Image: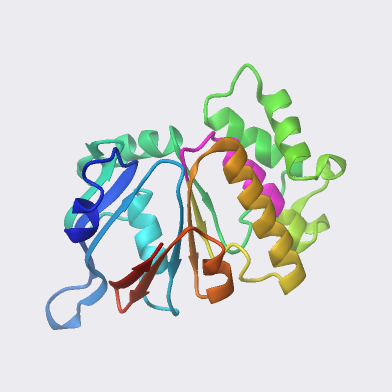
Amino acid sequence: MQGVAATSRAQFLAACRDVTVRYGSCEAAVIALDQVDIALLPGETVALWGPSGSGKTTLLHVLGGLVEPSDGVVVWEGSPLSTLDTSARARARARGIAYVFQGSNLLPAFSAYENVAFAAYVAGERSSVERHAVELLALVGLQGKADNLPAELSGGEAQRVAIARALAQRPRLLLCDEPTGHLDSDTSTRVLDMVDALQRRFGFTLVVATHDAEVASGLRRIVELRDGRIVGQLT
């Protein structure tokens, strides 16, 4: 538990304590995470860096309460997230954890505005959904694309809508899984610069899973994973 102990004197936002994730049983078991310890401080930016199959996505899902650990504890704002039932974990996520995936995962029948407004509504912004959605689309530079369906957007535009949708939840923790993996280098740079500017503006904790060393170098802490284990950290 060295990673958690190192930050025990500070109030961390989320943490994994000796977390193992195992799929299957006995000799057929696959270990996706192996005794992982990590703590996230409010407002920091972290890269989970490693090759495909290293456990990056599983760790994101564990931190966000989408995957239950086989062993160990996941803590969110001082409470054990991994011991909550499914509905309680969903409420905890809705109150402060948002995702951006490699593919934008937008609702295809909803316009850009509707995708963001729906997320704001689900997050409890019932009295200000329209204003909040319009403001967020403007923040990501897409006020002129509000009525476009996802199929009518470029890859970079769709990912910016996905980021606006995530921000509609007013997250304290934003988890991004290879957010530029399907974009060209110029578009990737623009999207990452925008995420960096939004993080500095709103102060959420940002965790980005990536196999790209250049992307990882743009975050203040790099956590390297190999074969389900944390093998190094650079700050």
- Queried whether the magenta region covers residue 166, the answer comes back as yes
- Queried whether the magenta region covers residue 215, the answer comes back as no
- Residue at 68% in and 56% down: 193
Residue 106 at x, y percent in the picture: 65, 51
Find the residue positioned furthest to the bottom.
Answer: 27
- Residue at 87% in and 42% down: 144
Q: Is residue 228 visible?
A: yes
Instruction: Say above or below: 77 vs 18.
Output: above
On the picture, is 47 further left or further right than 84?
A: right
Instruction: Say above or below: 52 vs 223.
Output: below
Residue 5 at x, y percent in the picture: 19, 52
Q: Is residue 66 visible?
A: no
Quarter occupied by the C terminus: bottom left
Q: Residue 217 versus residue 14: which sits nearer the camera? A: 217
Residue 119 at x, y percent in the picture: 59, 36
Instruction: Say above or below: 214 vs 122.
Output: below
- Residue at 59% in and 62% down: 179
**What's drawn in magenta, residue-wise?**
160-173
Residue 18 at x, y percent in the picture: 17, 59
Give the number of marks: 0
Quarter occupied by the N terminus: bottom left
Find the residue positioned furthest to the top.
Answer: 127
